[in-house]
Image (tube, rainbow, N blue to C red):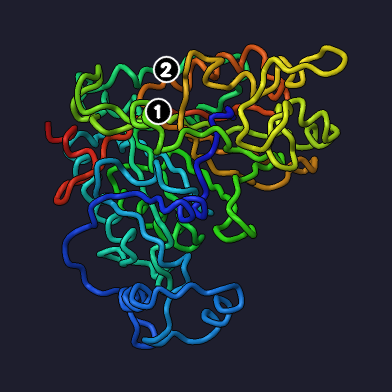
């Protein structure tokens, strides 16, 4: 849980006029199943033509009434990410309110040919669903009434994938297994995997619909190794754009790298040339995935002041303890009247800063999770930590090593699962994700 932090909220992106530019998905597709004579595609067209944004009351009324050709979707439903582009979706897109992470292992006997066919199916399904269209076969109808809801589907390859497909020579050095950390208590059954899929959307049914479609598409070629569910604050839930909070109640995301920064691409994406990575990884990225359990009962026993000392920031507004607002640069040398450092030497925000780690930085895009309450009354909750970088040995690893040695937050979290995945660049029109690897 490094203070590289979460991306801007969707509201912040809109307020700043920012967005993800990518090519629109191509190819004609049949209209989805109709309800009351209106297809999902017709609803989208109506919404796009009117540009109407419904408030809380208007949204509730709109969904209570049967849809008609003049009924537009609410703004959350009309959000759309593009499947085709330089990079895969789900990396720089704004946080979504619902997420699913799922890892697959190729079935015994399945190899490169089966993997290529699977990525073709997955890419076709992802393109259609992200456009607000039904899957092209056996669609479940779960998301029949909804728009795309900013759905993104992202695909990656694990270390073991290359041995299973005879592509060991194409395995990137950057995909070497992560080192062991002293705070790890990893469940191997919920770690790693041949293939990894990240799904995010601003509607829970849209997200689950994508998860179910991806699972069905796997068929006999691959089987689920593990699957995790997460959430974030819904767009529009706050009176004004603000950084998200995690389940500890802390503002979490202040120092995330931003696409507007000149070195953003170099930190997050593999360059098209001059890299030690194979050519098929050009414009791709590496995702580190960690299931981090938060020991909330222990955390909540601390006073607000003690919690702030652990993090190094004020709980109310995320400002550094050295003063100012959330975005004020932290003064690591400032002392109080007694001569003690205002930001404690082991504060999480101090230790995880890029300038305290040789400039190491990563783009964090996680989800919170809650998987129930045990018989002892302890919640199984925390963070599905996902971070993106051009090279994990220069991004995640040095920061986590530093945190492992002396982060005050360490006694309140437990790393329970881990994975590292090579996420290739985006698919061009007419391509599927991973084609440059699987057909090289």
Q: Position of residue 282 (x, y in %)?
A: 23, 30
User: What's the residue at 39%, 41% (across, down)?
Assistant: 91
Frontmost residue, 41 versus 157? 41
Mark 2 vs mark 1, CA separation in Å? 8 Å
Frontmost residue, 406 versus 291? 406
Specify the label residue 389 is tagged with.
Answer: 1
Specify the label residue 332 is tagged with.
Answer: none
Pointer 2 or 1: first along the chain: 1
Vertical comparison of 313 with 234: above or below: above
Q: Image quadrant of residue 368?
A: top right
Can the viewer see residue 229? yes
Can the viewer see residue 98? no
| In-image side of 27 versus 96 (left or right) | left
User: Farthest left residue?
Assistant: 440
- The residue that mark 2 highlights is 394
Q: Image quadrant of residue 308?
A: top right
């Amino acid at each position: 849980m490094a203070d590289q932090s979460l991306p801007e909220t969707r509201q912040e992106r809109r307020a700043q006029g920012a967005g993800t530019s990518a090519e629109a998905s191509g190819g004609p597709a049949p209209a989805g199943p109709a309800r009351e004579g209106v297809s999902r595609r017709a609803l989208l067209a109506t919404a796009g033509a009117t540009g109407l944004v419904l408030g809380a009351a208007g949204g509730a009324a709109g969904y209570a009434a049967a849809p008609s050709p003049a009924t537009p979707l609410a703004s959350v439903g009309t959000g759309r990410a593009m499947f085709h582009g330089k990079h895969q979706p789900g990396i720089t897109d704004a946080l979504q309110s619902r997420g699913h992470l799922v890892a697959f292992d190729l079935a015994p006997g399945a190899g490169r040919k089966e993997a290529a066919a699977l990525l073709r199916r997955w890419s076709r399904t992802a393109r259609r669903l992200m456009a607000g269209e039904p899957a092209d076969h056996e669609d479940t109808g779960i998301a029949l009434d909804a728009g795309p809801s900013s759905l993104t589907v992202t695909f990656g390859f694990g270390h073991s994938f290359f041995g299973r497909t005879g592509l060991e020579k194409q395995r990137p050095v950057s995909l070497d297994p992560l080192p062991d950390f002293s705070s790890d208590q990893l469940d191997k059954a919920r770690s790693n995997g041949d293939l990894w899929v990240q799904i995010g959307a601003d509607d829970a049914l849209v997200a689950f619909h994508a998860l179910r479609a991806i699972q069905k598409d796997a068929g006999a070629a691959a089987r689920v190794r593990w699957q995790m569910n997460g959430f974030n604050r819904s767009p529009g839930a706050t009176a004004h754009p603000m950084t998200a909070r995690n389940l500890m109640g802390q503002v979490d995301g202040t120092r995330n790298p931003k696409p507007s920064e000149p070195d953003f691409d170099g930190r997050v994406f593999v360059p098209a040339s001059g890299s030690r990575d194979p050519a098929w990884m050009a414009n791709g990225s590496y995702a580190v995935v960690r299931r981090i359990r938060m020991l909330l009962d222990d955390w909540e026993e601390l006073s607000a002041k003690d919690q702030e000392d652990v993090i190094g920031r004020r709980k109310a507004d995320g400002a550094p303890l050295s003063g100012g607002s959330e975005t004020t640069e932290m003064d690591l040398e400032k002392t109080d009247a007694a001569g003690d450092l205002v930001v404690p030497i082991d504060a999480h925000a101090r230790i995880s800063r890029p300038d305290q780690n040789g400039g190491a930085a990563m783009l964090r895009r996680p989800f919170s999770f809650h998987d129930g309450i045990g018989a002892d009354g302890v919640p199984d909750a925390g963070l599905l930590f996902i971070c993106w970088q051009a090279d994990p040995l220069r991004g995640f690893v040095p920061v986590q090593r530093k945190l492992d040695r002396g982060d005050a937050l360490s006694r309140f979290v437990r790393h329970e699962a881990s994975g590292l995945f090579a996420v290739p660049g985006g698919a061009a029109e007419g391509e599927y994700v991973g084609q440059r690897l699987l057909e090289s």
